Image: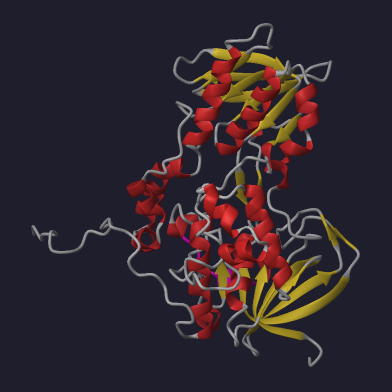
Amino acid sequence: MSDIESVDILAIGCGPFNLGLAALASTVEDADVLVVDSAEEFRWHPGLMFDEAKLQVSFLSDLVSLVDPRHPLSFLAYLADVDRLYPFLVREDFFPTRREYEAYLLWVVAQLDSLRWRTTVEQVRWNDELELFEVSVTSGSTASVASGGAASVTSGGTASVIHARHVVVGIGTEPVIPPALTTDSPALIHSSQYLFHSDTAHAADSVTVIGSGQSGAEIVIDLLEENLRGGPAVTWWTRTPWFAPLDFTKLSLEMTTPAYMDYFHSLPEDARDRVRAQHWQFHKGISTETLARLHDLLYRRQLLEKLQPVRLRQSVAVERIDTLGDGRLRVRGQHLDTGKALAHTADLVIACTGYQQRKPDFLAPVVDRLHRDSRDRLVVESNHSVAADGALADRLFVVNAEAHAVGVSAPNLDIGAMRNAKILNTVLGREVYRLQRNTAFTSFAADGEDVVDEQ
């Protein structure tokens, strides 16, 4: 047993959230954290890294600043280190581009020695006698999934075991294509892979984009710019009743604060599910800046002649996609307002249909000891641990997999530092990081002096 590696916290998956956990822990002397990932190296949404695409949150929503603004791994520390602090100031824009944010994340990666790549987690078991997790891993392996902790395909590598007193699961999400869009044709791609196929899209005669979130809008902008240069015809279908903006107004954004997260967690399960369904514009809309850019491109088309057509349709449900004999795709749908059938043909279809949680199959040995709600989802406590009996309590944590428990904030970058601080405070048994207590003006709960008892 002496040659088995032991750590206090094993974080599985190295996306921004578990990277943030390692960053916060790096300045805490007794915080022993190891982050493992099956990927060769850190990458952040490479298929959607448009040059001008911006974050939808402020630079303060970095890995550490919202719990420790003086931390040496903050975004401002990065800017100072690369000698770009004054240009950023003069730029007068609190929203970095995605490319710059990835550069910041890579800078943090280079500062840490607690990250281990090409390491795939196979199984997580609980040892009752030792009261710790026994985690089987394959190191030096190659994997098919980047920055996800666990991979669906691995080859080679050396098997070993890591003992961990706590485990943090942060394997993120994976692209999903609904059954109605499923086809074996290579002419259908998911939006997450768009930039790897952009040359093909630009050279096509016609391209269809399905889905109207931020990614869909950015892809349509890229296609419209090419259309203005004589490029493909563009069709854009969305199921939503309009090309809806992200709701990033000031008081609405208070619903992404820790105060609202705590309130949402306090609600009964059925109330959480009902309320959560109303929050779709926080993550399925389009930024107002992007909408303005779209409209400008559409307007400019009116001044030019002999361009390929562009068609935008809302309230359309795709029913199926047929592959034609020449390899093109026939997209069939229904206009939801009228029930009329719609169809058109495209050389390439981009499915901007979102993501789903990756399944942590490696938890199979302990899954029967974890609590589940009425819809078979993990019960997640306010400190982001998975509810469990006995010694397993406060030992297993999840990040960006608990929207059903804490609400719309779960996937947001601006909640990452707060969540990681809660995890570190729980694991170390003290307030390592003081949590902000006054985070919203709105009173969310039905309490206080204006609540009356009418019984």
Q: Position of residue 27 (x, y in %)?
A: 59, 80
Q: Is residue 367 magenta?
A: yes
Q: Position of residue 151 (x, y in %)?
A: 76, 58
Image quarter for residue 130? bottom right
As drawn, which residue projects farthest toward the left?
A: 454
Span shown in magenta: 366-373
Of 260 and 77, nearer the camera is: 77
Q: Can you say whether 410 is above or below 421 in the image?
A: above
Residue 173 visible within the image: no
Residue 357 visible within the image: yes
Of 221 and 121, nearer the camera is: 221
Say left or right for 315 vs 221: left
Q: Is residue 129 magenta?
A: no
As drawn, which residue projects farthest toward the top?
A: 306
Q: Position of residue 175 (x, y in %)?
A: 67, 44
Image quarter for residue 392? bottom right
Of 141 and 29, nearer the camera is: 29
Residue appearing at x 35%, y 52% in the figure: 271
Q: Position of residue 125 (x, y in %)?
A: 68, 76
Q: Quadrant of the N terminus?
A: bottom right
Say left or right for 263 vs 73: left
